[in-house]
Image (cartoon, rainbow, N blue to C red):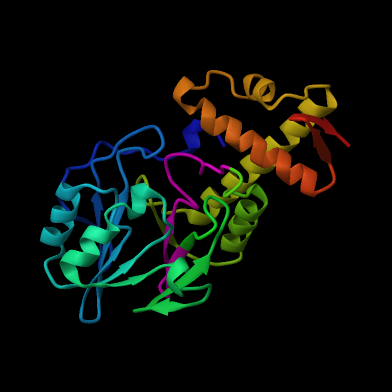
Amino acid sequence: MSAQQFLTEPPPPRGVALPVAPGIRRLVAHNPGPMTYHGTNTYLLDGNGGITVVDPGPDDAAHVAAVMAQAGRRIARILLTHAHRDHAGALPALARATGASVHRFIEGLGDGGAVDGWTALHTPGHAPDHLCFARADGVMLTGDHVMSFSTSVVIPPDGSMSAYMNGLRRLLERNDSLYLPGHGPPIDQPRQFTEALLAHRLARAAAILGQLRAGQTAPDAIVTALYAGLNPSLRGAAQASVLAHLLMLAAEGLASETDGMWRAL
């Protein structure tokens, strides 16, 4: 997937929750970076008996205070897409301050579970506990499974490329009309975007297999060959992605590893 296909937006205002869909506002945390874009998206959902907060964000007292101030009503529930600290770091502080109930994969919310009109879809790959949340009108909160500014990072052993790609295929079986990701702006053409993500991953897997068949055996050298012009700060993520692809190819019987070196089968 080329950089031109990703979505961009100006730096958002800080401490302000802005509408992105009916009954949904977005508040962007102040944790910008190459892996988080302008910051983590915290969503405020209008719900029964109060506000539902999705992904409280990083452990940042100013962001917690902004979430509480911008909610405008009692915060009744907290949903978590996954436990990475840029999404869940603020969870303990927000839960203590509000008394809100917490709903996440590791606390009894499984695939198909429902919370105040939102249905959880277990989409491991980026993280084993990752959940997306779907509403009946076609809006889906995709966390880091589908981000609008970049591909998702898949880092073994917790990350699985096979699971990630299967999760993309699962989303393509649905007919959602709007994705609200964990980082970056909304995705208003989710099918086309997800198809491009999947095609990109398939092409990357084919390119890595091609490198193995050409005699390249070291993952680091494969990164150098395939990621031209890579930002040095992203090299670790690229190495993790190549390893995740190699492990997927091994599971498919197409590659094997000995002492850290890989070959095609």
Question: Does 146 lie within the magenta span?
Answer: yes
Bounds of the magenta segment: 132-155
Lateral position of residue 253 relative to residue 101, left or right: right
Can residue 20 be seen in this snapshot?
no
Lateral position of residue 108 relative to residue 165, left or right: left
Q: Position of residue 124 (x, y in %)?
A: 56, 58
Q: Position of residue 91 (x, y in %)?
A: 29, 59
- So how many labels did they put on this image? 0
Above or below, 86 against 204 in this view is below
Between 96 and 35, the one lying in front of the other is: 96
Q: Magenta-highlighted stretch: main secondary structure?
A: loop
Between 53 and 86, the one lying in front of the other is: 86
Write the residue at 32% across / 47% down. Answer: 40
Q: Position of residue 186 (x, y in %)?
A: 37, 51
| Residue with the most extreme right position | 265
| Residue with the most extreme bottom position | 49
Above or below, 250 against 232 in this view is below
Q: Position of residue 97 (x, y in %)?
A: 16, 65
Write the residue at 63% across / 52% down. Answer: 165
Q: Quadrant of residue 49?
A: bottom left
Can residue 102 be seen in this snapshot?
yes
Question: Does 80 lie within the magenta span?
Answer: no
| On-image quarter of the C terminus | top right
Write the residue at 63% across / 24% down. Answer: 223
| Residue with the most extreme front position | 259
Write the residue at 53% across / 26% down. Answer: 235
Lateral position of residue 122 relative to residue 177, left or right: right
Between 172 and 265, the one lying in front of the other is: 265
| On-image quarter of the N terminus | top right
Above or below, 114 against 247 in this view is below
